[in-house]
Amino acid sequence: MTYKGRAEADIALNAIGLMSGTSLDGIDVALLRSDGEHELERGPFLSVPYSAEFREKLAQALQTALTIKNRSDRPGNLAEIEIELTDLHVDAVHKFLDAYSLRASDIDLVGFHGQTIFHNPDKGITVQLGDGPRLANKLGMPVVYDMRANDMANGGQGAPLAPAYHQALAANLDPQWQGLNPVCFVNIGGISNLTYIDGENPPHAFDCGTGNVLIDQWIHSHTGDDFDQDGLIGWQGLVDHDVAAQYIEPMASKLDRGISLDRLDFRPLEKGTLSLQDGAKTLAYITAQLIAKSQGRLPKEPKLWVLSGGGRLNRTIVDELHKALEISPNSNEKRIIKSEDLSISGDAVEAEAWGYLAIRSVKALPLTYPTTTGVSGACIGGVVQMPTENS
């Protein structure tokens, strides 16, 4: 079956999801098949890293983007970077298809996130670099893009958008985990966000603090590496509670207002403030504490915490989260697990979500809700771009 621009409610579609997150590390590509509701079949995944040179361009683009006044603004060299980024996504899709012996005709839709360079809900502006029409034409596939804008136009924060997908994952949990309810999906990427699902209330979701971004910046400033591999550097350190309080208290107050976050909302820990190890440990502690404090905003206490994103592999963050939530690693009543324990790739979840949202978009199903982004009502979103015949 090939999607031609209209999708019936009960038809399952094959969608590729493309995600480039706040860590600026590369492009995640995932395939899934779904009807946009509970029918769900996850496919293969591929991560295509950015070059160091392009990562530096994106880091500079974040600073240039601070001068943006309107969503269409592309000051400085942002227009050129947008073209380059779009073409890198084209290459990533081709690498994915080749890696798994797939044909373009096997794909009905592509969900395109792009690269967020500016996100300010107070001003109602969110900007993701990425040219949807260019991507559609170069791939010869329908592309759904710009999925945050309509939410913000209707009073939402524009994030997080993955909760609709998390709800589908929760509906497909293996029976052995269904006794641990409610479930909370926590994505620890550059920024942490969570989705709470209990089967009774609508999904609740919100950003819940710094994820890896401060740790990554700290490690890079000292070693040149991009992150704390397995959290081993932080594991050797000690928490400086005075430094931690300078981050936790103001950020917790900000999060209580239900805002979505951008990496520029966090002040990097200045080099020389602490030793390398103590800095990494303290920042991991901050990440865990902010996640734990978010529990107070949920209807019920979660019994199952499912971790995805790069932070799930940081043993220091995970250890500090067990302490903050007062959950023993050996507990049978409450658990913190990695998404892989549910046979879900923690690296692929965000990209899968974007494929799932693309399917919901073409079926005019809501992407966001008042309890996930603060939008005024259940809100559809996304722009569908068909490839032009002469492309």
Image: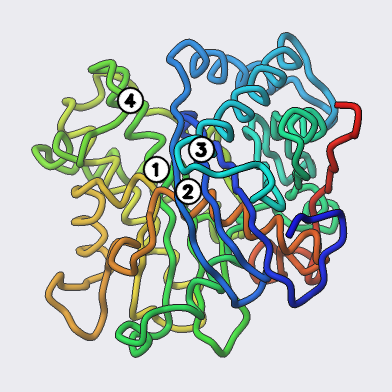
Nearest the eye: 209 or 139:
139
What is the number of the mark on residue 67? none
Q: Would you say the residues marked 4 and 2 are in contact, meaning their CB atoms lie under 8 Å apart?
A: no
Q: Would you say the residues marked 1 and 4 are in contact, meaning their CB atoms lie under 8 Å apart?
A: no
Q: Which residue is mark 4?
A: 226
Q: Tag 3 or tag 2, which sits nearer the N-term?
A: 3
Q: Would you say the residues marked 1 and 2 are in contact, meaning their CB atoms lie under 8 Å apart?
A: yes
Q: Tag 2 or tag 4, which sits nearer the N-term?
A: 4
Q: Secondary structure at mark 2?
A: helix
Nearest the eye: 162 or 173:
173
What is the number of the mark on residue 247? 1
Separation (CA) of disc 4 from disc 2: 24 Å
Percent position of residue 140, x then y: 76, 36
Separation (CA) of disc 3 from disc 4: 24 Å
Q: Indicate how the structure is coloured in the image.
A: rainbow
Q: Is residue 121 above or below residue 387?
A: below
Percent position of residue 320, x then y: 22, 55
Q: Tag 4 or tag 3, which sits nearer the N-term?
A: 3
- Identified by mark 1, the residue type is Tyr
Which-is-in-front pick, marks 1 and 3?
A: 3
The image quadrant of residue 283 is top left
The image quadrant of residue 146 is top right
Which-is-in-front pick, marks 2 and 3?
A: 3
Separation (CA) of disc 1 from disc 3: 40 Å
Q: Which residue is mark 3?
A: 96
Separation (CA) of disc 1 from disc 4: 22 Å
Q: Residue furthest left?
A: 236
Separation (CA) of disc 2 from disc 3: 39 Å
What is the number of the mark on residue 251? 2
Q: Secondary structure at mark 3?
A: helix
Which-is-in-front pick, marks 4 and 2?
A: 4
Percent position of residue 169, x then y: 49, 71
